[in-house]
Amino acid sequence: MKAFTKLLLLALSLLLLASHPAQAVPILTLTTDSTSVEQGAEFSIALDVADIADLFGYNVTINYDPAKIRFVSVSEGGFLGSAGTSFFVPGVDDGAGSVAFSGAALIGAIGGANGGGNLLNFVFAGRGAGAALFTLSDLLFIDSTPGIDRGRRRLARRGRARHTVRGTGAGFAGADSGRCAGAGCAPSRRVAAPKMRN
């Protein structure tokens, strides 16, 4: 009986060591400097994160309609780098309408970034008339836990935001609110859907 009690205490101790405290649900937000632009004009979109703990690296893809939007550039925001030296590797496929990041991470055996801030800054230009939808996919946030799986935490797959390209000719759409709209806006498993806001 003593052996069983010791084994039970050992199992409970290991269970307590393996458990993690509850964390807030991370929130991703897409913010734009303008919800409507003239055809050919550039606009910016920032990807921000809030309420995240120990962010060591991430993967994300931003998708858009290449008939309406043209990719111009992307730069790394300061949030991940606030915890140490970081790098990011964008994969741009403007023809398919996607910019993927499959290797944004910190360098070295350090803890991840905590809290919230700017992850990425995009510059796009209006190409065609009408409302264009931006979505996020392939989201994966990685904490600093050592090991093969690096403590991966998979988050929601998709969120949606609208952006309108306007012009003076026939067929141009009017202004859009820029607010998150549609089925993709419902909160998902681990992250609230992104929203564009002014």
Image: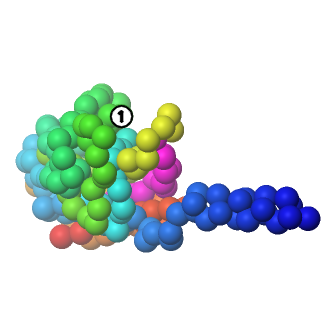
- Quadrant of the image containing the N terminus: bottom right
Locate the C terminus by quadrant: bottom left
Residue at the image position 57 percent from the left and 60 percent from the top: 17
Q: Is residue 81 left or right of residue 65?
A: left
Q: Residue 115 falls in which quadrant of the image?
A: bottom left
Q: Left or right: 25 with respect to 16?
A: left
Q: Return the x and y of residue 179 as percentages of the image width and height.
A: 31, 69
Tell whether position 7 is magenta.
no
Residue 168: image x %, image y %? 11, 55
Q: Residue placed at 48% from the left, 46% from the top?
A: 152
Reading the image, the residue beneath label 1 is: 102
Element at label 1: strand
Q: Nearer the viewer, residue 185 or 148?
A: 148
What span is colored magenta in the figure? 150-161
- Residue depicted at x 19% and y 47%: 84
Q: Does the image show residue 195?
A: no
Q: Is residue 52 visible?
A: yes
Viewer-proximal residue, 161 or 165? Answer: 161
Q: Is 157 included in the stretch rendered in magenta? A: yes
- Left or right side of 198 for 5: right
Residue 12, x across and y down, in percent: 70, 64
Q: In percent of the image, x 35 and y 34: which residue is there? A: 102
Q: Which amino acid type corresponds to the residue marked 1 in the rendered image? A: Ser
Image quarter of residue 108: top left
